Image (tube, rainbow, N blue to C red):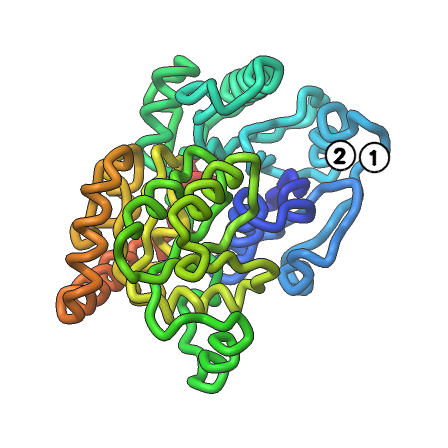
Amino acid sequence: MKIAFDGKRFFNNGSGLGNYSRDLVRILATYCPENQYILFNKNQSERGKEILNLPNVSFKETSKGNLSRQFKMGKDAQNMDADIFHGLSGELPLKWNNKPIKKIVTIHDLIFLRFPQYYSFFDRKIHFWKFKKAAEQAVLIIAISEQTKRDIIKFLKVPENKIRVVYQGCHQSFKETQSPEFLNSVKEKFSLPEKFILNVGTIEERKNLLNIVKAINGTEIPLVVIGKKTKYFNKVEKFINKNKLQNQIFFLENVSMDELAVIYKLAEIFVYPSVFEGFGIPVIEALFSRTSVITSNTSCLPEAGGNDSVYIDPNNSEDLKSKIIFLWDNEAERKRRAEKGLEYVQKFNDLNIANELIKVYQEVLR
């Protein structure tokens, strides 16, 4: 098979959709080497360079122009005789020629419809139009969780038989065993506390960091936070200053992927009380790192966390506090849950994902 991808997120996004795109191409190229994988974009970047060095992965510069992604990229893929075009982030090109090509799109979440208050009117309209159009054009839609599948059926009115759930994995770093020397060097570099709980993700209202801060108020449990700050950070900072928690909470910046993997391993507990997620990759990262998880009982998070993660009501900081204290004070329970979590998370390993993706590609070509 010759498979073409919209490479915009692969080259331009450092996290989220970028990680999904790079992981997907890496996994396919490694486990299904008999196919050709072509990434279309206006330009390349440093991101994903090691993936482009694989013998069956190539870059193709798509035609120039502001709207080339919408109007030229699809035709460029057809002109290279691609069998399949896979849009990796909820979009497909708008213009095509008469050459045969099968179109697939991955939809990650429809949070802009579930929580419209987090998005401007204009953004909601544009997102809805793009996603609806892509869902109509695609032969099959990949949803990254059962939750997202339910939302596609509900909000985009897509029949269930047009959707396949293929889970995401996570970066290889989280599955590796790093040396004690590297663990110590990361600990020293970021002046990490001896024991701490961890939160990773954009610091925005939906991710709910304020409730973690409220939960550790009145305890001596250190919290390490890694994530890009948005306006919501001001609200969190105000609570921290008011309650004199500055010496208990550590905000880290410029953390590489390898360093992040180490920090997950060093944490006693990973805490992720997000109100809603399309999938929740940080939960998978924690489980691969043998770190016990506390997360929300909403959306897809129980799918990601499995039976041995601890679940809370994301709107109840007292519930969160009691569960953090319970695990913090109980090393044997933390270890038990971490070991069980590592068994569970193998369903999101690279080989399983490769097999599921290839099944989808073979299905559309039949």
The one nearer the camera, 146 or 365, is 146
Give x and y (percent) for residue 296. Answer: 27, 40
Dividing the picture into quadrants, the one containing residue 62 is top right
Q: Which residue is mark 2?
A: 76
Which dot marks residue 31? none
- Element at badge 2? helix
Question: Which residue, as the protein is rendered here, is positioned at the far bottom?
Answer: 181
Q: Residues within 10 Å of mark 2 (few under 14, many from 20)?
A: many
Q: Earlier in the sequence, mark 2 or mark 1?
A: 1
Camera-side residue of 286 and 161: 286
Q: Give the residue at x 44% y 34%.
A: 205
Circle 1: element type = loop
Q: Residue furthest right?
A: 64
Quadrant housing the C terminus: top left
Amino acid at pointer 1: Ser
Q: Residue at x 33, y 41 (%)?
A: 211
Question: Front-most of 52 and 45?
Answer: 45
Q: Is 21 left, or right, of 201 in this rendering?
A: right
Q: Which residue is mark 1?
A: 63
Q: Residue at x 58, y 64 (%)?
A: 256
In the rendered image, which quarter is residue 314 located in? top left
